[in-house]
Amino acid sequence: MLQDAARLKVTRDDAIILVEFTHRKILDEANIVEIGDQLVALIESEHRPKVIISFAGVDHLSSAALGTLITVNNKIRNHDGQLRLCNIQPQIFEVFVITKLNKLFRIYPTIKEAKESLEPQNQKGVV
Amino acid sequence: MRLGKTGLHHSGTNVTPSSALWLRMDIPSDLRRLQDVEEAVLSQCQRYCYTNRDLFALKLAIDEAVANAIKHGNRSDSEKHVHIKYRVTPHRADVVVEDEGPGFNPAALPDPTREEHLEALHGRGILLMRAFMNNVVYSPTGNAVTLTKFNDSPRTMESAVVLCQA
């Protein structure tokens, strides 16, 4: 099933929700509130969601986007789900390293590796 | 002299071979106008072959500084403006972002990389500015910040213009 909710591309595959961004400036300050609302709405109705967010094609993000990702991570954790990030280009990955958020998020090079990292039996608190 | 929607106008009186005019623009407290500031500064940097890494760093720092000015300085008050002044040479880019708020003490902010703050939703903008810029200096009142980025691969002004426009 493919949904095109504004600037998010959401694909569901075998209980895994893959989120991709359709615009390279999607995580700019001007867009982030709307994107955050869409991501939270996506997760809100899910039980134990397994979510992969791919940053392919994204060439910028702001600290507000990091705050949004933390909110999404907390939502997923509250729903006993798992979140993985992937396809993060080196300059953006550096942002995660500087803020030490690479310790908070589980980040993988590719969607395939992110999928493989998801645990079949969700455990509470595992993100 | 005002140019276009961004309210861009030239300032300063003299230019020397190694310097450039300070340019100014004022924007209302509207995050949608951030893009105007980025484009104004980065288009100048591109003339001088600033590296993609430098451009990424400047865009990030400008985003953070202007967003802070709008959200925290001006409290998103549509009656208030953010005043930007910038100067780009082949060797360095300086951007001054000033809001109309009361200012703050950046030294009083908690370290967002500490474990107890790692999941905080805000407070990383200044950390990122400092990480990606060569210099970040706040005014004594805290309502203006000067960002400085040196060009990683400086060329002379003449050769840069020729090469980048080729």
Image: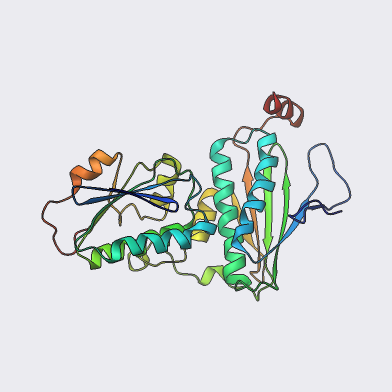
Say which quadrant the C terminus of chain A sits in: bottom left
Rendered residue at 68%/53% (across/down): B95
Q: Position of residue A66 (x, y in %)?
A: 42, 58
Q: Is residue A10 left or right of residue B30?
A: left
Q: Which image quadrant is residue B67 in?
A: bottom right
Q: Position of residue B128 (x, y in %)?
A: 50, 55
Q: Nearer the viewer, residue B139 or A12?
A: A12
Rendered residue at 68%/28% (across/down): B164
Kindly tell me whether residue B133 is visible in this rendering: no
Q: Which image quadrant is residue B129 in?
A: bottom right
Q: Nearer the viewer, residue B97 or A28?
A: A28
Q: Is residue A78 left or right of residue B81?
A: left
Q: Position of residue B8 (x, y in %)?
A: 77, 53
- Numbered marks: total: 0
Query: Please, which colouring scheme is shown?
Result: rainbow
Q: Residue furthest right?
A: B13
Q: Nearer the viewer, residue B109 or A40?
A: A40
Q: Height in image: A114 above or below A63? A: above
Kindly tell me whether residue A54 is visible in this rendering: yes
Rendered residue at 62%/46% (across/down): B149
Q: Is residue A112 left or right of residue B142?
A: left
Q: Position of residue A98 (x, y in %)?
A: 42, 52
Q: Residue furthest left?
A: A121
Q: Height in image: B89 above or below A63? A: above
